[in-house]
Image: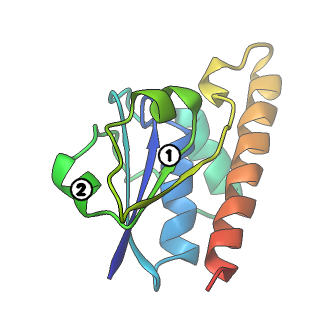
Amino acid sequence: MNKIYFLCTGNSCRSQMAEGYARIFLKNKYEIQSAGLEAHGVNPLAIEVMAEDNIDISHQYSKTIDPHYFKTANLIVTLCGDAKDRCPVIAPPTHSIYWPLPDPAQATGTPEQQLQIFRQVRNEIKQRILALASNP
């Protein structure tokens, strides 16, 4: 089975949300994992906004890049510029996609304003995962 790897800086928000959606919408196309350049722990607001869309990522955990999985992945999706710039070299025939998404963990303002940023990023990730799912 093909493998997909979602990467961001801390494996706390964006890549965790992508993994959650991929496990629903891409489960028949890919083995799915996510990781970060660092492991910051899964952000509670990411868990909350995913639960709003009936996706449970509370069992997922933050991890750093597994070199073996990285080398054997068919598709690597970087979800931020930091991961794109600092990611190990992606050798052919592995394909890569860059999704320049803002880091919701950096959101400021009231708790509701922060949740809105998380929801916006979540919705963007969902649309991109659905697009991958419809791509033959």
- Going by the numbered disc 1, the residue's amino acid type is Ser
Q: How far apart, in angstroms, are the residues tagged by discs 2 and 1?
A: 18 Å
N-term mark: 2 or 1: 1
Q: Secondary structure at mark 1?
A: helix
Q: Is residue 41 left or right of residue 48?
A: left
Residue 126, horizontal then vertical, whole percent: 69, 60
Residue shown at 55% from the left, 54% from the top: 18
User: Which sits in the foreground, 124 or 97?
Assistant: 97
| Quadrant assignment, res 37 | top left
Q: Quadrant of the C terminus?
A: bottom right
**Coloring scheme of the render?**
rainbow
- Going by the numbered disc 2, the residue's amino acid type is Lys
Residue 119, horizontal then vertical, whole percent: 76, 43
User: Which sits in the foreground, 65 or 126?
Assistant: 65
Q: Is residue 58 left or right of residue 72?
A: right
Q: Which residue is mark 1?
A: 15
Residue shown at 33% from the left, 30% from the top: 39
Residue shown at 35% from the left, 60% from the top: 92
Q: Is residue 29 above or below residue 57?
A: below
User: What crowding class fits label 1: few (fewer than 14 Cα within 10 Å), some (14-19), or many (20 or more)?
Assistant: many
Residue shown at 34% from the left, 39% from the top: 62
Please indicate, yes or no, whether residue 56 appears anywhere in the rendered image: no
- In this view, the mark in front (2 or 1): 2
Residue 59, horizontal then vertical, whole percent: 37, 53
**Which residue is at the far left?**
68
Residue 73, horizontal then vertical, whole percent: 32, 63
**Which residue is at the far top?**
109
Q: Which residue is mark 2?
A: 71
Circle count: 2
Please indicate, yes or no, whether residue 85 appears anywhere in the rendered image: yes
